[in-house]
């Protein structure tokens, strides 16, 4: 008997739907919201309104692209949180409506757990237990992944997330939102010749707010001396900021591997699309004898395929929810998931 899941993701500014059959992704369609570019960040109300417009066409596209009929869907998985509440409400309500109309079971999914389980969409798959550095616009976490639905948080940011560090730096440099991919591209032509400080945070936790402040003061000082400083040095500034963000992440990941003795090491989340970070993980892995895993880029950034994969493993364990379920803006992974 095959099991077909419709998955919905709407936690931030991407409206995404996927069809996952027996743990295999048949389709994965995403509508990106360009409206936020002009504001330099996600405007929550604009995001909710765009989800409302996009959700039905995106779901129809995913069903069509999978080559299935909607009568073949056996369950609906949806992102319950964490995320922007107005964005989540659209996806959760749509999932409930769809499930009610066809009398299907509902599966709630934690967005951060789903980023990790994106690794199970394709081969090679990490072996349990593995370490996962999940880096996104809202989170920076190191997890010990013991099983599909059993993850222990061992380190996290005490202030900004890694993606925020990229995006806020981009704003200071006058780049569009989201700036992470733009900085990544510019950094390829630059040299990391400006030294930004490494924060001294004990253990496996991260901090990025000091870096943001030091970049701000550095730019202020340089621009006061030369108003064209940013234009003249953009690629080197980007290379320097990226190198420091990558070193902050890699130093903690190395420490986590030393402390736990785990040699299966994975990256997840939107920032794992960063070429500097991907390269650093591969090089570190070769040096330390780790097996390293990085999902392909469209499974790193927000997508519904990862929600469907997580939904599949929850379905196998009979973890369903009722129609009284409501979104959670905050949902720590350490909170028992059902
Ligand atoms: O996981 P994600 O798509 O959404 C959240 O759950 O937050 O992550 C979005 C973040 C943004 O901060 C974006 O700038 C960053 O991922 N990002 C990148 C790259 N691609 C996306 N950061 C650095 N380099 C990239 N290539
Ligand atoms: Zn995400």
Image: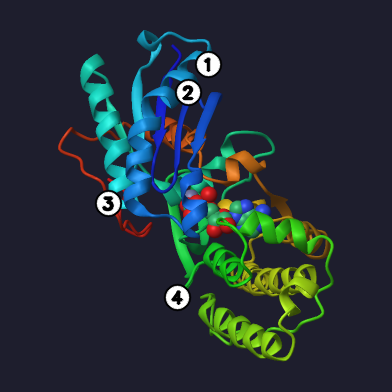
Between residue 153 and residue 306, name the one nearer to us. 306
Looking at the image, do the residues carrying marks 1 and 2 touch, with CB atoms under 8 Å apart?
yes
Secondary structure state at the residue bearing disc 4: loop
Q: Residue at x 78, y 67 (%)?
A: 235
**Looking at the image, is mark 1 or mark 3 earlier in the sequence?**
1
User: In which quadrant of this rendering is ligand 1 seen?
Assistant: bottom right
Tell me: residue 300, above or below residue 285. above
Image coordinates of residue 201 in percent, x first then y, are 54, 84
Secondary structure at badge 3 equals loop
Beta carbon at label 3 within 8 Å of ligand 1 = no
Q: Which residue is mark 3?
A: 328
| CA distance separating discs 1 and 3 | 30 Å
> In the drawing, what numbered circle is on residue 19?
2
Kindly report the distance in space between the C-alpha atoms of the residues bearing marks 2 and 3: 24 Å
**N-term mark: 1 or 4:** 1
Please give the name of the residue rendered at 56% of the width and 55% of the height, measured from the top-left corner: 178
**Residue position marked by numbered label 1 in the rendering:** 66
Query: How far apart, in angstroms, are the residues tagged by discs 3 and 4?
Result: 20 Å
């Amino acid at each position: 008997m095959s099991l077909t899941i419709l998955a919905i993701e709407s936690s931030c500014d991407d409206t995404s739907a996927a069809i996952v059959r027996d743990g295999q992704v048949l389709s994965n369609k995403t509508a990106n919201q360009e409206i936020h570019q002009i504001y330099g960040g996600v405007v929550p109300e604009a995001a909710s309104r765009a989800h409302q417009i996009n959700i039905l066409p995106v779901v129809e596209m995913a069903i069509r692209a999978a080559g299935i009929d909607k009568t073949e869907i056996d369950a609906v998985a949806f992102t319950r949180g964490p995320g922007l509440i107005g964005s989540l409400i659209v996806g959760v309500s749509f999932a409930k409506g769809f499930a009610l109309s066809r009398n299907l079971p509902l599966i709630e999914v934690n967005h951060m757990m789903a980023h990790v389980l994106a690794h199970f969409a394709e081969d090679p798959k990490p072996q349990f237990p593995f370490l996962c550095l999940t880096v996104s616009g809202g989170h920076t976490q190191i997890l010990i992944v013991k099983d599909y639905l059993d993850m222990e948080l061992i380190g996290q940011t005490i202030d900004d997330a890694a993606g925020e560090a990229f995006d806020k730096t981009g704003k200071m440099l006058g780049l569009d939102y989201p700036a992470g991919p733009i900085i990544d591209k510019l950094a390829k032509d630059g040299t990391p010749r400006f030294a930004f400080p490494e924060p001294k945070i004990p253990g496996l936790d991260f901090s990025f707010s000091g870096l943001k402040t030091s970049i701000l003061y550095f730019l202020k000082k340089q621009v006061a001396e030369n108003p064209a400083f940013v234009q003249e040095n953009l690629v080197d500034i980007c290379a320097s900021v990226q190198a420091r963000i990558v070193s902050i992440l890699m130093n903690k990941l190395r420490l986590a591997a030393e402390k736990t003795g785990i040699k299966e090491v994975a990256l997840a989340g939107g920032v794992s699309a960063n070429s500097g970070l991907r390269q650093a993980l591969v090089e570190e892995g070769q040096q330390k004898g780790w097996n390293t895993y990085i999902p392909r880029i469209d499974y790193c950034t927000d997508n519904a395929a990862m929600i469907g994969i997580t939904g599949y493993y929850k379905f196998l364990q009979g973890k369903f929810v009722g129609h009284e379920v409501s979104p959670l803006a905050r949902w720590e992974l350490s909170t028992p998931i059902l």
